[in-house]
Image: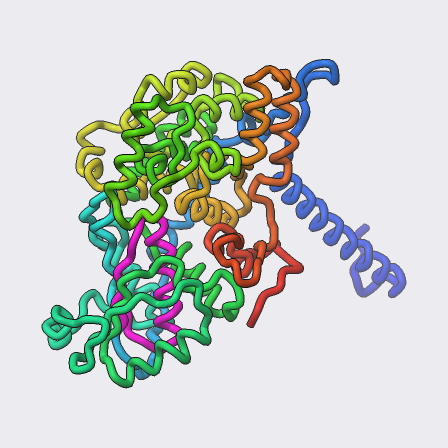
């Protein structure tokens, strides 16, 4: 016979209530532990016995990934749902003038520059003109902002922070065409801000210039805002631009999605940013494993570009310092040492390998499932992007961000920005190769001082703490180039990093 709550003794009611609360709390704890377990089960696990090679297989890299619950599917659904979001109300403020910016460098360098310029426009209460992309760099890409990014979304999604216009009003265009940096009679000033500057510089040195000039044109924007010491709201705005407002065009997004889906049908995959490209080798002065003819060709290319400052470079010394990209052969050995087997799908997220097929042959033999864009989609679909290096880089960027593991062989701008995206999206595994230590061990292995087992164990130990885990950014006062890059580790925008000194 059922007993009503009113008929039960108060003591019994209290006991039932406490028991129920404890049950709910216990169940919540179990769910949280399961969630944390799934997140951190990407730690390395040993395979084999102690007498064999200590081959650490990255368990979440090769198995147990993908399928209907894949990270890519979740992110795609989230991205699609954002289209229906109501636009934020515009921020009302008196504009102090117009800021024009000309970005320089490759796609991912320009991406970070755009984020910085939005933050500066917000700080100084300026109207930002949609940034101009670099058309004079080595790649000679003629893409405009709207060829890569969704312009309308960029403008609308940030309108509660800063006013952005597609072009400068006509009354300023005529004046701007003849302006020089020392002009006193025309209302536009061209200049390059001081690198790695903080808010004080912009407030005290740049803002007063708008009393004299109606438009300021920053003609170089690389690394013009410091990594550290920036107020928290501006740091978060940099993240908002990078991770949300800079959305690729529907055409680029569609092709990137198709590539990821095509690879996912075959299973999980590694995105390898193999930066063994002619321009990178010429610029860095790295010619290890090159013939004398190739080394001379790279040197001629370096001298052909006057804005590449270093001309005479000691390639051997630079390599031993860890300042050269790994060769395809070195990359093959490192991947095998880290536990990746011949069944691993590896997507090459890079341009043409210097030396062509003969140089990449050893990597292809070790990893037969080596994939490139050209192998996964119709040539006709890819053709409209092929002569635009920044658009091709955008496609590689999408595939790299969605991968199960990301491994760059050089820490350039793409490697850093992809690393930052993967941290932001939940600490997806990025194996950040310590080239200085690896080169030392590779040479010892090649001259037979180290056995394969010893080399493999050393490679695994070197990278146990280099997997893109939560971490504070390394700060070095007065040496911003040696600090950790904000866009590689924007910890101010991450939820699980504690104990870092955050200003603001």
Task: Say left or right for 278 vs 401.
Answer: left
In the image, 499 versus 318, the foreground residue is 318
| Residue shown at 65% from the left, 44% from the top | 36
Residue 7 at what x, y percent from top left? 84, 63
**On the image, which quarter does residue 346 sit in?**
top left
Asked if the magenta segment contains residue 104, the reply would be yes
**In this rendering, does residue 353 appear at all?**
no
In the image, 408 versus 276, the foreground residue is 276
Task: Say left or right for 36 vs 388.
Answer: right
In the image, 125 versus 173, the foreground residue is 173
Residue 263 at what x, y percent from top left? 39, 28
Which residues fall within the magenta stretch? Answer: 99-128
Asked if the magenta segment contains residue 32, the reply would be no
| Residue shown at 16% from the left, 82% from the top | 185
Q: Give the main secondary structure of the magenta stretch.
A: helix
| Residue shown at 27% from the left, 44% from the top | 390
Residue 49 at what x, y percent from top left? 73, 16
Task: Say left or right for 254 vs 426.
Answer: left
Quarter of the image for the C terminus: give it: bottom right
Image height of 504 relative to 427, above or below: below
């Amino acid at each position: 016979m059922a007993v009503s709550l009113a008929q039960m003794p108060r003591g019994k009611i209290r006991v039932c209530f406490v028991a129920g609360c404890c049950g709910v709390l216990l169940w919540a704890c179990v769910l949280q532990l399961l969630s944390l377990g799934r997140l951190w089960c990407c730690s390395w696990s040993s395979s084999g016995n102690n007498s064999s090679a200590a081959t650490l297989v990255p368990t979440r890299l090769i198995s147990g990934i993908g399928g209907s619950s894949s990270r890519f599917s979740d992110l795609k659904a989230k991205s699609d749902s954002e289209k229906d979001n109501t636009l934020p109300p515009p921020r009302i403020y008196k504009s102090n003038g117009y800021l024009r910016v000309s970005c320089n460098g490759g796609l991912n360098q320009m991406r970070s520059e755009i984020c910085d310029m939005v933050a500066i426009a917000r700080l100084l209460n300026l109207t930002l003109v949609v940034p101009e992309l670099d058309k004079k760099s080595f790649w000679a890409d003629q893409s405009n902002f709207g060829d890569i990014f969704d312009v309308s979304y960029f403008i609308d999604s940030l309108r509660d922070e800063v006013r952005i216009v597609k072009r400068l009003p006509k009354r300023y265009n005529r004046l701007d065409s003849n302006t020089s940096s020392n002009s006193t009679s025309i209302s536009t000033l061209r200049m390059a801000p001081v690198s790695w500057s903080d808010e004080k510089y912009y407030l005290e040195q740049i803002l007063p210039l708008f009393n004299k000039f109606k438009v300021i044109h920053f003609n170089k924007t690389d690394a013009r805002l410091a990594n550290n010491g920036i107020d928290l709201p501006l740091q978060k705005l940099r993240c908002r631009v990078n991770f949300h407002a800079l959305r690729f065009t529907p055409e680029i997004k569609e092709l990137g999605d198709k590539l990821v889906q095509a690879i996912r049908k075959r299973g999980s995959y590694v995105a390898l940013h193999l930066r063994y490209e002619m321009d990178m080798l010429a610029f860095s002065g790295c010619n290890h494993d090159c013939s004398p003819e190739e080394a001379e060709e790279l040197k001629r290319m370096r001298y052909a570009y006057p804005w590449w400052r270093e001309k005479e470079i000691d390639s051997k010394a630079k390599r031993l310092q860890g300042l050269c990209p790994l060769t395809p052969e070195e990359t093959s050995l490192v991947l095998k040492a880290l536990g990746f087997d011949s069944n691993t799908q590896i997507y090459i997220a890079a341009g043409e390998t210097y030396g062509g097929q003969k140089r990449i042959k050893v990597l292809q033999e070790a990893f037969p499932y080596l994939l490139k864009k050209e192998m996964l989609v119709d040539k006709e679909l890819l053709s409209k992007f092929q002569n635009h290096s920044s658009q091709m880089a955008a496609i590689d960027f999408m595939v790299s961000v969605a991968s199960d593991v990301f491994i760059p062989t050089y820490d350039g701008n793409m490697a850093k920005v992809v690393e930052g995206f993967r941290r932001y999206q939940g600490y997806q595994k990025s194996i950040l190769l310590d080239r200085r230590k690896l080169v030392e061990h590779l040479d010892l292995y090649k001259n037979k001082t180290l056995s394969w087992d010893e080399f493999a164990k050393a490679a695994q130990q070197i990278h146990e703490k280099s997997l893109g885990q939560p971490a504070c950014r390394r700060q070095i006062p007065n040496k911003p180039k040696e600090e950790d890059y904000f866009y590689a580790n924007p910890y101010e925008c991450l939820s699980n990093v504690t104990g870092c000194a955050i200003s603001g």
